[in-house]
Amino acid sequence: MRLLAATLLLALTACAQDPAPNQGEPAGPTSEAAADLTPAQQAYKEANDRMHAGMASVDADPDVAFMQGMLAHHKGAVEMSEVALEHADDPEARALATAIIAAQAKEITQMEAWLAKRGKPSSSTGANTAGATDPHAGH
């Protein structure tokens, strides 16, 4: 049950469009606000920004749009999990991050194969292709 709750919390965090401000500072991309972020916060923010950029362009074909959007989302989850492994101390958080990387990597491979079979890029812009064969590539 705790694992499910932690998974849901991570998923909700990954999908949050407006992250909470840091210590009263705006969460926007200003250099002053970024200077106040810890290395872990900065890494999570960058991963979140890349994930949402990859999900922003939606293909006209709903099947392709689903695969491309979920691919960006899964790559974001892998990247956030890698940040957790670099910065997190809690054994349960680290174990969950490791499990997410393994599970998402399999699904990333499946979605990329589905898109490739149809001659479609990993994203509708073709820009979100880091990790095409290795979900850790580009990090």
Image (spheres, rainbow, N blue to C red):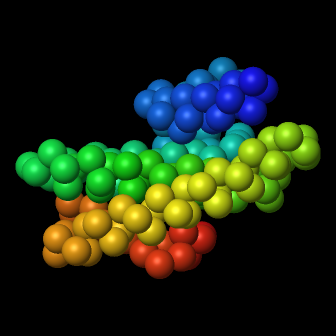
Quadrant in which the C terminus appears: bottom right
Instruction: Please state which of residues 42 and 56 is positioned toward the viewer in this rendering.
Output: 56
In the picture, measured across the screen, residue 99 lies left or right of residue 51, that is right
In the picture, measured across the screen, residue 56 lies left or right of residue 11, that is left
**How far across and down, in percent of the image, does residue 97 sit?**
72, 50
Is residue 116 in sight in this rendering?
A: yes
**How far across and down, in percent of the image, does residue 133 sit?**
47, 78
Residue found at the far left of this picture: 60
**Residue that appears at 36% across and 62% down:** 111
**How far across and down, in percent of the image, does residue 76 sit?**
51, 52
Quadrant in which the N terminus appears: top right
Is residue 38 in sight in this rendering?
A: no
**How far across and down, in percent of the image, does residue 50 sit?**
45, 54
**Residue that appears at 10% across and 51% down:** 61
Instruction: Please state which of residues 113 and 130 is positioned toward the viewer in this rendering.
Output: 113
**Residue that appears at 32% across and 49% down:** 69
Q: Tell me how many marks there are.
A: 0
**Residue that appears at 45% across and 68% down:** 109
Q: Which quadrant of the view contains residue 25? A: top right
Q: Which quadrant of the view contains residue 118? A: bottom left
Instruction: Please state which of residues 15 and 4 is positioned toward the viewer in this rendering.
Output: 4
38 shown above or below 130: above
126 shown above or below 82: below
In the picture, measured across the screen, residue 19 lies left or right of residue 132, that is right
Residue found at the far top of this picture: 24
